[in-house]
Structures are given as C-alpha cells and as structure tokens.
Image (cartoon, grey):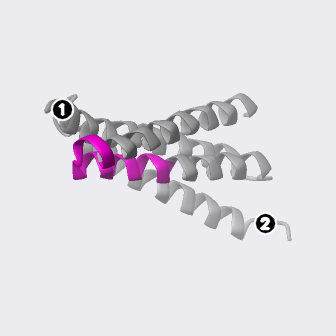
C-alpha cells in the first residue's frame, strides 16, 4: 500500500501545482470563471487527496478504501477540471459529459471516504 500512497501524493502534488498555475492565468491573463473554478477544485482536491493518503497510511483499518477514495477523487478532478480548463483555454472539450462524469466521481469518492470512516469508527478497538 506504500507505493499507492506515494503515487496519490505525487498526483496530488501535480494537481496542486497545476491549480496554482491556473489560478495565476485566470487572475492575470484570461479572467475566466471556469478556469478559476478548475483551479479551486484542483487545489481543494489536491489537499483532500493528501489528507486521505495520510489517513490511509496511519489507519489500522480501511487504509485501502481511503486510497480508493483518493484515487477516484483524483480521476474525477482530472475529468472535471480538464473539461473546464480545456473549454476556457481552447474552447474545446475532451469529450461530451467529461465534467458531469468527473463531478459524479468526486461525489462518489467523498461518499466512499465518509462510509469508510463510519465503518472504521464502529469497528474501532478503542
């Protein structure tokens, strides 16, 4: 599970860096609200994935499920933010329904994270 955690952290770091770059472009060059929204989601979800990876590494139970949630969150973020970014920067979309699918994956990942935490809470030893 260690390599998976590090992979999630690496992907979250890249997402965070892209989020900062997009925020700068949105603020100084384009002024597009879609690009600003993509930036916000990238930064927020990068932090969330970092936290989920940290929880997974320290969890006595459910660690893999927290990493599954983080991985799905990253995939959803890529689709959602990629769609908004491509639309703002080139006027094109990667494919139809990329943003709604990405948003749905992000919602699913939060449900998995919450469900895992609830299940682990009920089965905690202390």
Residue 91 percent location from the top left of the image: 13, 33
User: Which quarter shows the N terminus?
Assistant: top right
Instruction: Identify which residue is drawn at 18% across, 32% down.
Output: 93
Residue 82 percent location from the top left of the image: 31, 35
User: Which quarter shows the C terminus?
Assistant: bottom right
Q: How many marks?
A: 2
Instruction: Identify which residue is drawn at 63% across, 30% down.
Output: 7
Give the residue pinned by disc 2: 124
Sequence-wise, the earlier of marks 2 and 1 is 1
* Horizontal relation, residue 63 to residue 46: left or right: right
**Which of the numbered marks, if any, corresponds to residue 93?**
1
Q: Is residue 122 above or below residue 17?
A: below
Q: Secondary structure at mark 2?
A: loop
Residue 37 percent location from the top left of the image: 31, 52
Does residue 34 show up magenta in the picture? yes
Q: Is residue 126 visible?
A: yes
Gap in angstroms between the C-alphas marked 2 and 1: 45 Å
Name the one closer to the observer, 99 or 31.
Answer: 31
Q: Is residue 72 visible?
A: no
Name the one closer to the observer, 26 or 87.
Answer: 26
Q: Classify mark 2: residues with Cα within 10 Å, few (<14), some (14-19) or many (20+).
A: few
Stretch in magenta: 27-45
């Amino acid at each position: 599970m260690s390599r998976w955690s590090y992979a999630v952290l690496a992907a979250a770091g890249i997402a965070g860096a892209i989020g900062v770059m997009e925020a700068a472009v949105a603020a100084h060059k384009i002024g597009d609200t879609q690009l600003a929204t993509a930036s916000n989601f990238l930064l927020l979800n990068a932090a969330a994935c970092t936290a989920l990876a940290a929880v997974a590494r320290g969890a006595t139970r459910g660690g893999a499920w927290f990493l599954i949630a983080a991985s799905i969150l990253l995939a959803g973020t890529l689709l959602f933010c990629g769609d908004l970014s491509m639309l703002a920067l080139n006027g094109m979309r990667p494919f139809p329904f990329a943003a709604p699918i990405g948003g749905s994956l992000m919602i699913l990942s939060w449900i998995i994270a919450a469900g895992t935490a609830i299940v682990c809470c009920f089965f905690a030893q202390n």
